[in-house]
Image (spheres, rainbow, N blue to C red):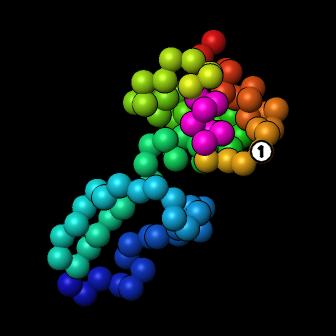
Amino acid sequence: HGLPDAWLNDQVRVFVAPGAPTVELIDVPGLRVRMVRLDYLFYMKAWAGDPIDQRDLRVIANALELKDENQASEIVRGFSPGELPRDVEILLESLFE
């Protein structure tokens, strides 16, 4: 179609761990688009611990039908080994205040 080689930005790939759980969005001849599952996206944004992601986290928590910080914490702990940093715990708690 005459598109430049870099017409599709796949730079987000560097933020996603190999083997991360994904879902297929589009699969047509010549193009397959996958995204990480919502629970994994929730984990990624929570682990980043950036307050700017709080709005996104609320939207994702709502889509995942999370009711409290315990459910949110379970998701994040399910993808991350060890203890959660305190700033991540605080961020998760703040979602349900």
Q: Is residue 24 left or right of residue 58?
A: left
Q: Residue 73 in magenta?
A: yes
Q: Is residue 25 left or right of residue 56?
A: left
Residue pictured at 74% horizontal, 29% vertical = 89
Q: Mark 1 points at which residue?
A: 82
Give the percent coordinates (x, y) of residue 84: 76, 38
Q: Quadrant of residue 83?
A: top right
Q: In this view, does 94 lie to the left or right of 26?
A: right
Give the percent coordinates (x, y) of residue 16: 56, 61
Magenta part of the chain: 72-78
Q: Residues within 10 Å of mark 1 (few under 14, many from 20)?
A: few
- The dominant secondary structure in magenta is helix
Give the percent coordinates (x, y) of residue 26: 25, 61
Q: Which residue is most to the left? A: 29
| Tag 1 secondary structure | loop
Q: Nearer the viewer, residue 78 or 37?
A: 78
The amino acid type, in three-letter code, at marker 1 is: Gly
Residue pictured at 67% horizontal, 20% vertical = 94
Q: Which of 4 and 24 is in front in this view?
A: 24
